[in-house]
Image (cartoon, coloured by chain):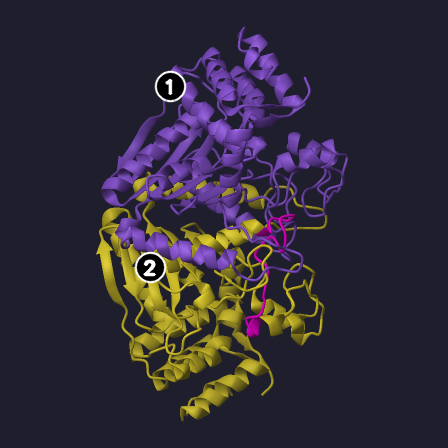
Chain colours: A yellow, B purple
Amino acid sequence: MKSKTIQYKHLKTFCEELFQRLGFTVSNSVIITDVLLMSDLFGIHSHGLNRIGMYHHHIQKGYIDPQGQPEIVTETPVSAVIDGKRGMGQLVSSYAMNIAIEKAKTSGVGLVTVRNSNHYGIAGYYSLMASNEGMIGISMTNSLAAVVPTYGKEPMLGTNPIAFSFPTNPSPFLFDSATSVVSVGKIEVYDRLSKPIPLGWGLNMDGNDEQNPAEVLKSVFSSKSGLHPLGGGSELFGGHKGYGFSMVVEILSSIISLGTTSNHVEKIDGNAGVCHFFAAIDPKIFGDPVDIQNHLETYLEEIRNSEKAEGQNRIYTHGEKEAESFLRRKVDGIVLSEKTLDQLVSIANEVNANIKEYLE
Amino acid sequence: MKSKTIQYKHLKTFCEELFQRLGFTVSNSVIITDVLLMSDLFGIHSHGLNRIGMYHHHIQKGYIDPQGQPEIVTETPVSAVIDGKRGMGQLVSSYAMNIAIEKAKTSGVGLVTVRNSNHYGIAGYYSLMASNEGMIGISMTNSLAAVVPTYGKEPMLGTNPIAFSFPTNPSPFLFDSATSVVSVGKIEVYDRLSKPIPLGWGLNMDGNDEQNPAEVLKSVFSSKSGLHPLGGGSELFGGHKGYGFSMVVEILSSIISLGTTSNHVEKIDGNAGVCHFFAAIDPKIFGDPVDIQNHLETYLEEIRNSEKAEGQNRIYTHGEKEAESFLRRKVDGIVLSEKTLDQLVSIANEVNANIKEYLE
């Protein structure tokens, strides 16, 4: 099937039904679909419907238990530790961020660390849950190791994204970023185009810097080597800084939850072991939320209106691109690649779902 | 005076006496000296005694009030907003981090945002105050704008460092990093050596990428343009990510404190307006601190023992370099450059201090 533009509402119906066939309840299928489609609406296809094949595979492998119910291991008025019980990452994470928000409503701040979960999609979905309630939202996750420490060859860290959001108009401030120099998905794009990647993105199986994307993908998927952290492969451009931000994610997700560090994620059958961290902070504990929001909006406007570099005509503040894409794709539909479409049809057939019509 | 190695205890006596002559109390001079000399002991000379000339200048300019006493504007059991009252950054910040630690002792977490302060030295000093008490420590500050947003020409952000520390043995985990690709100090080093800087560090007065360090310094000091964020000048290597981390610092320091954003810092006579953020989190709210610390120490050891890249023989974890330098320089002394020595002697003469003997 060729790549195709499909209306949001059709994809929503398709996706909700598909997850029910995969063993999830109606209400859980709605949550999973909402997370995945927000990514596609944001234009971040690497974390949207594109990933359904992976989730299906992880259910088959026993990483994801569609019946898995997250449990609170321990809690205080400002914190909780959650055991994800191998539930779908999106469900465990919505549950955990809701706890962080509830704690912030009563205590001003809620810090929630999670172990034994799974790949949770885009980090920003959960930070936005908090900023939609007028709060600072923070979301982090570790992941299958794909990033080497500075001067290392072995992947010891996940791409470990950090999302931070804050309520602003017309759209929330939303910073959502892997702590690696690029995502694995970006390397795959270069590979499909047979285009060399810039030096400093990743390593080959021998642990040397490599411009052939296929060689870097080979080292990532075999866990022999991987990508560089943000800042690249040496201290010259600050690779040790990206490595440090990645460590912060690891400490707040896998360490304080006593969970699985990235170098051991997806290494044991039956438990991927992915860990997350969520924080919600009510700006009320610092002052009048309206004054604070106005102060940020003024600063964002000053940045957008500041002088541009040679040849540039726009400075974005974080979250603008996503918000514009969201509105556009809600109206125009979402383009699914041939590969994604084929995968969706194949899974639909496999679970005997008569829901292909939405894709046709 | 040629560059010279001076014993730590002599520098400590010199520095404490000098700050008394500059108008600070004995106990405040001890705190300021401790912050500055920790930086020199860590080998980060750009934030140590090297900066005394700048602090002296800022006192004369009225940015720093040696008698300024920080005040609590508002507080809750988990938070505080501090008005630094133009006090010395090191004093305001020690005061603020102590409040964060006290709140974390009773509430599990303390978040403190600060406005109307001054340059605070190394970020890591304050995060270490928390990790020395067995807690997670976080420290951030904004600063005089020197960094351009992605695709911008005007400096709108400070070098905005983030420090994060966690108690571990034999030395604490300590990540302390500017969110710019390099520090201004690094450009100055290249300039002294008349060495071209790599493309991607900074811009000239016209807002174009520049390899002549003198041209980049000219644009920084005239506030016409500046450095790139971590990740460089485009999205190719993730410059928008460094820009985002810098925004997080700005939001937690200058925005929620209703303080001065970096683009307005040091723009008004009589108030530099520097803003900070401090957090202390007691790991007890998540589980047994001993188990958590052991878990992190195991992971750090796995990283250090992982396979090295071609030609490399050591992978550092964050804080090791600083701890090794600290022990070495405590014994061997600290090398002060000719420029730093001349500056110290000149200030000592100016305040009529008979304390030059410690430098000779």
Residue A172 makes an appearance in the image? no
| Residue type for callout 1 | Ser
Instruction: Look at 54% across and 81% down and name the residue there.
Output: A340
Among the 4 quarters of the image, the one containing residue B181: top right
Whether the magenta-drawn stretch holds residue A75 is answered as: no
**CA neighbours of label 2 inside 10 A, class few (<14), some (14 to 19), many (20+):** many
Q: Which residue is mark 1?
A: B27
Residue A30 makes an appearance in the image? yes
Give how far across and how far down residue B173 sits, in percent. 44, 47
Give how far across and how far down residue B113 sits, in percent. 38, 37
Q: Chain of mark 1?
A: B
Instruction: Look at 41% across and 39% down and name the residue there.
Output: B127
Give how far across and how far down residue B193 sits, in percent. 74, 34
**CA neighbours of label 1 inside 10 A, class few (<14), some (14 to 19), many (20+):** few
Q: Which residue is mark 2?
A: A257
Q: Which residues are magenta?
A: A220-239
Check if mark 1's residue and mark 2's residue have beta carbons within 8 Å: no
Give how far across and how far down residue A195 sits, in percent. 71, 70
| Residue type for callout 2 | Ser
- What secondary structure predominates along the stretch shown in magenta? loop
Which element is circle 2 on? loop
User: Nearest the camera: B235 or A198?
Assistant: A198
For the C terminus of chain B, the quadrant is top right
Which element is circle 1 on? helix
Whether the magenta-drawn stretch holds residue A226 is answered as: yes
